[in-house]
Image (tube, helix red, strand yellow):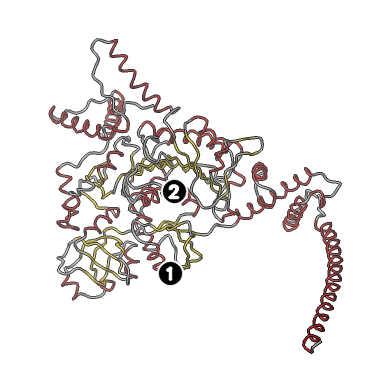
């Protein structure tokens, strides 16, 4: 039977407050730079950020409208989960944010087949596995890691933090770390329970 | 007579002779043939007698002997009048057959009876045989991320031997053998494909969702069908994926995110209670929880686990789910389709459920649009179902080399007879009556369920504003919570005292 619903449905997800927004955008800007504007201004299909439990979701308004009638405990996910707010108040990007990061990525790193396999098992990217990278990237910049394939579209397999700037990478030893691992698509199998 | 004429005369004579000779030859040949046929028939009869001698020893323990006896009984039953042993009745043969099947294939007696009611003896044996072997591995290409040709090329480079699934599916690939684990390739992790049985493509194809619609997947985990629906809708509109089992939710969420289906909402609720929360769908898919008697090759434990009670129990849940699903669909919206599917082959869980729904709601069965499959049963033992149920589809492992599956497509004609909608209308009427009686009624907004999301958003924003205006007052604790807090503090103090 339809209850009035209003009372039950109130304590559901909410928009991010100012502090949270700053944290989320700081992380996003590290990866996609000015393209965050594109995330906010999608005229055909407006999207919004929502906090549900401790997860941050990026979701189209249409989908959000259909998610809101559900009770807080029943609702598990909607749209795309970007990451979580930790207990200490920091924001962590999750691998589920990869499609958005890959779509707007400013800085990219391409790795070879064997290095890609190693990367999806939680390892850093070494100089020896590096095939190609964006020019003039400063150190400690967020980068999206792609598996390089011949004659086909490249597959994004995760993201991380550049250990050294582009010009330093050219000079370093084969065993040196180029990208610090942050998240990889292997987590869909390894860490299924904690994704969302 | 000129020379040429005489020559032609001679040649004519020759031809006549030749014809006569041919006729004689033919007669002889026919006679020989008849004799040979008679001999063959006699031999066959002899062979029949030999092949149809059945050893009626119930304590035959050798598996090979049981297998041979099974084949013999099936052979005898193929032409019982001729091949029977006069001393034994038909029921004796059938009982022996059941006994042998139970031993050889390891089914409990109830299930043997059930399958023999469903199939003819030789088809039943084919079913049991097919249920021993695994079905071919198939994958579904995620068209949101890649194309089938591209993925096939990549996988072939990885040493996978594959082929397109068939003319009926544009997104399926059949895997023959593979050097690498298909569940761990970079393409799999990047969401380019989903490992999914061919049979579970069928309900999604039958549902045929269109971009921009509002679709519900009632029993969604682990998300194979949900992501397929999302891909058919080109990631527009909304797919609400529900599953009752909380333990299966992480897999569902992971698959949805891996495949990039961002138009989905995942919720964890009893499907039968969804009517309280939502409604007004274009299409609903119920891949109902079932006994799994169509996928014995995947889980052989059902052979002796399942009893009549289990089947009736699951049928009961399925009926409730079915009615809820029909009530959730809005007949005035485009589509208004409900697809009901199970991975079971029993009549009780399939046709009976559809028949139940047909009697209680204003729905009709329509063609599923699938290119293969056998028609749904409308007569089974003493039961008779609505004739339109023949338009639903049954898929069998021995006939189609897919999991045993049932798919039925229903279209909702009107909202008549729908409990939820009737109750909503009643609820609308009630406050009006109250208004006329009471002199100062409180203004209470009644919002149709479908519009609720937007109204709620506005309401919530107002509530937040009001809260801020009041100056962050802490919400009042309920009695229970206060008691709990007190208890906690007391406990804590007790600990402190001990320490001191």
Q: Which chain letter goes with mark 2?
A: B
Most extreme residue toward the front is: B1
Choose between B337 and A92: the one closer to the eye: B337
In the image, residue B196 above or below residue B428: below
Measured from the top left, where is residue B212 in percent x and y? 32, 45
Residue A116: name its quadrant: bottom left
Q: Which residue is painted at 57% across and 43% down in the image?
A: B376
| Residue B204: mark in rendering | 2
Q: Quadrant of the N terminus of chain A?
A: top left
Q: Is residue A84 left or right of residue B192?
A: left
Measured from the top left, where is residue B230 in percent x and y? 36, 49
Q: CA distance from mark 2 to mark 1?
A: 27 Å
Measured from the top left, where is residue B144 in percent x and y? 34, 56
Choose between B427 and B311: the one closer to the eye: B427
In the image, residue A55 above or below residue B425: below
Q: Which residue is painted at 84% across and 67% down in the image?
A: B36
Q: Which residue is painted at 55% across and 39% down in the image?
A: B388
| Residue B156: mark in rendering | 1
Residues beneath discs 2 and 1 located on the same chain: yes
Q: Which chain letter goes with mark 1?
A: B
Choose between B265 and B250: the one closer to the eye: B265
């Amino acid at each position: 039977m339809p209850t009035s619903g209003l009372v039950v449905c109130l304590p559901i997800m909410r928009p991010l407050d100012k502090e949270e927004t700053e944290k989320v955008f700081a992380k996003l800007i590290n990866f996609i730079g000015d393209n965050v504007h594109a995330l906010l201004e999608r005229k055909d299909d407006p999207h919004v950020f929502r906090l549900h439990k401790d997860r941050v979701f990026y979701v189209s308004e249409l989908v959000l409208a259909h998610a809101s009638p559900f009770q807080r405990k029943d609702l598990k996910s909607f749209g795309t989960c970007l990451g979580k707010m930790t207990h200490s108040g920091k924001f962590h990007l999750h691998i589920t944010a990869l499609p958005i990061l890959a779509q707007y990525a400013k800085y990219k790193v391409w790795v070879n087949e064997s290095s890609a396999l190693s990367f999806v098992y939680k390892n850093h990217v070494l100089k020896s596995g590096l095939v190609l990278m964006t020019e003039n990237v400063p150190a400690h910049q967020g980068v999206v890691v792609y598996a390089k394939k011949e004659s086909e579209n490249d597959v994004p397999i995760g993201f991380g933090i550049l250990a050294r700037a582009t010009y330093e990478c050219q000079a370093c030893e084969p065993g040196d770390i180029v990208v610090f691992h942050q998240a990889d698509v292997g987590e869909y199998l390894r860490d299924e329970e904690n994704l969302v | 007579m000129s020379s040429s004429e005489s020559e032609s005369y001679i040649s004519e004579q020759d031809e006549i002779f030749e014809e006569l000779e041919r006729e004689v030859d033919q007669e002889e040949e026919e006679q020989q043939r008849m004799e040979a046929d008679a001999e063959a028939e006699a031999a066959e009869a002899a062979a029949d007698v030999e092949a149809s001698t059945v050893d009626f020893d119930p304590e035959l323990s050798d598996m090979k002997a049981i297998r041979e006896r099974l084949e013999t009984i099936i052979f005898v039953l193929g032409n019982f009048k001729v091949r029977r042993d006069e001393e034994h009745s038909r029921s004796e043969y059938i009982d022996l057959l059941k006994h042998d099947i139970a031993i050889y294939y390891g089914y409990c007696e109830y299930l043997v009876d059930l399958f023999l009611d469903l199939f003819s003896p030789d088809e039943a044996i084919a079913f049991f045989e097919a249920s021993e072997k695994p079905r071919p591995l198939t994958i579904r290409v995620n068209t949101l991320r890649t194309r089938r040709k591209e993925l096939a090329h990549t996988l072939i480079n990885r040493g996978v031997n594959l082929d397109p699934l068939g003319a009926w599916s544009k997104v399926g690939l059949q895997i023959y053998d593979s050097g690498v684990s298909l569940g761990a390739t970079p393409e799999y992790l990047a969401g380019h494909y989903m490992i999914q049985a061919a049979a579970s493509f069928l309900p999604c194809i039958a549902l045929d969702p269109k971009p921009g619609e509002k679709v519900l997947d009632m029993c969604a985990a682990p998300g194979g069908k949900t992501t397929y629906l999302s891909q058919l809708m080109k990631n527009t509109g909304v797919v609400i994926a529900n599953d009752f089992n909380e333990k299966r939710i992480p897999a569902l969420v992971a698959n949805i995110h891996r495949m990039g289906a961002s138009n989905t909402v995942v919720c964890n609720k009893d499907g039968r209670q969804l009517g309280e929360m939502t409604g007004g769908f274009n299409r609903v898919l119920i891949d109902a929880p079932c006994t799994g008697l169509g996928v014995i090759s995947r889980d052989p434990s059902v052979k002796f686990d399942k009893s009549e009670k289990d089947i009736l129990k699951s049928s009961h849940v399925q009926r409730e789910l079915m009615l809820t699903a029909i009530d959730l669909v809005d007949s005035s919206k485009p589509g208004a389709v409900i697809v009901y599917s199970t991975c079971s082959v029993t009549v009780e869980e399939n046709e009976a459920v559809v028949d139940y729904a047909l009697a209680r709601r204003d729905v009709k069965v329509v063609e599923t649009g699938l290119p293969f499959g056998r028609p749904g049963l409308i007569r089974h033992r003493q039961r008779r179902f609505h004739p339109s149920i023949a338009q639903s589809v049954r898929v069998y492992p021995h006939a189609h080399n897919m999991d045993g599956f049932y798919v039925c497509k229903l279209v909702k004609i009107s909202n008549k007879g729908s409990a939820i909608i009737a109750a909503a209308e009643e609820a609308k009427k009630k406050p009006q009556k109250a208004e006329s009686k009471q002199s100062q009624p409180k203004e209470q907004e009644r919002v149709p369920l479908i519009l609720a999301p937007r109204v709620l958003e506005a309401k919530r924003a107002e509530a937040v504003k009001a809260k801020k205006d009041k100056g962050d007052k802490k919400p009042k604790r309920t009695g229970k919570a206060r008691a709990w807090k007190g208890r906690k503090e007391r406990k804590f103090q007790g600990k402190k005292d001990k320490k001191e």
